[in-house]
Amino acid sequence: MSGLALQNVVKEFGSFRAVNNVELNVPHGTFVCMLGPSGCGKTTLLRMIAGLDLPTGGAIRLDGEDITHVPTHKRNLGMVFQSLALFPHLTVGENIAYPLRIRGAAKEDQKKRVDELLSMIHLTGYADRPVAKLSGGQRQRVAIARALAISPKLFLLDEPLSALDAKLREAMQVELRQLQQKLGITTIVVTHDQREAMTMADTVVVMNGGEIRQAASPIEIYRRPADSFVADFIGQTNLLEVQADSAGRVEVLGQPIAGLALPAGASKGTLSVRPEDVHLTAPGAGALSGKVTFVRDLGGTIETFVDIAGRQIVAVSTPRARPDVTVGQEVGIALTPDVCVVLKK
Ligand SMILES: Nc1ncnc2c1ncn2[C@@H]1O[C@H](COP(=O)(O)OP(=O)(O)OP(=O)(O)O)[C@@H](O)[C@H]1O
């Protein structure tokens, strides 16, 4: 297969298993974001792909070749890791040309490639600037250009935008994705920022406890989470216990809801419904009923918190569809099967 394949990859530090039997195929030219809580093993996995750590078990293949034991400098990688900062005493051009220079590229070839890359990162004319005089975003773009100078087979980035302020980070996410699409380079980014992952990735890989919980497109991860960990980790969701009643119907908080099905063979599960899919109705008109406990008006969205038998549900609406409710009011909650996902417990 063309691209990257992780086959049963394991990493142990002493008796602690940081990465547990990871299987993943990254087709050539795709963009993968690895996402998960702190300590879930995403950096360790990236370091093994980079050759900076050796797996305890399993294999890593690039375009069909087993590279598990190939040293980093022979893997043909571009890397932007937090620890690999730019050389502060060199100019922008010298930084970008550095990987070409140490590989013995001719001076004119270096210059041509630097100009090409500067145009790609929208910094044409910046070759002679000292990197110390660049803004945070410009510096990050130079780091990206330096990593791409050798036209690598694989582009690896670890939290590349985390040092930037929120606005710039969002702009850079779009830029990075556009650059990747233009070059068609297989790219893997580690991030803890789900918005970043959803913006850039063809495939989001959600990890927890050293394992992949789900690898799928951003929209599938959001709409069809594989389990309650993924549902809760990605975006906001309402999680409610569900079980089969004596007649085999699915009950949510004691109320049977038509059209819901439990996972095969299960008598219990967890229902996930996104706040934007929760609709408030007149009391008694919905599948469930509860009492409004709080209304948060954030300008662009309005969140209504409803207590149902001690469980809290959040409904989100736009100002135009603002629910006409006040704190303390009884409301109904409409739950339709098409917006609910029932997950394994
Ligand atoms: N060299 C090491 N020796 C021992 N334990 C390690 C080592 N490197 C990582 N670990 C442990 O392995 C686990 C996974 O670490 P890793 O850095 O891959 O997590 P992460 O998902 O990238 O977290 P973060 O988002 O905080 O960077 C953690 O529990 C960490 O403490």
Image: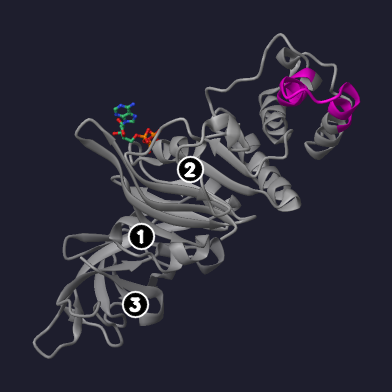
Judged by depth in the image, the label closer to the viewer, 2 or 3, is 2
- Please state if 42 lies on the left or on the right of 128 as rendered: left
Question: Where is the N terminus found, in terms of image quarters?
Answer: bottom right
Q: Earlier in the sequence, mark 3 or mark 1?
A: 1
Q: Position of residue 165 (x, y in %)?
A: 59, 31
Q: Dot 1 corresponds to which residue?
A: 231
Q: Earlier in the sequence, mark 2 or mark 3?
A: 2
Q: Quadrant of residue 264?
A: bottom left
Asked if the residue at label 3 sits under 8 Å from ligand 1, the reply is: no
Residue at the limit of the structure toward the top, as seen here: 89
Q: Dot 3 corresponds to which residue?
A: 335
* Residue type of the residue flagged with mark 3: Leu
* Residue type of the residue flagged with mark 2: Asp
Would you say residue 106 sits in the magenta stretch? yes
CB under 8 Å between discs 3 and 1: no
Q: Position of residue 223 (x, y in %)?
A: 44, 68
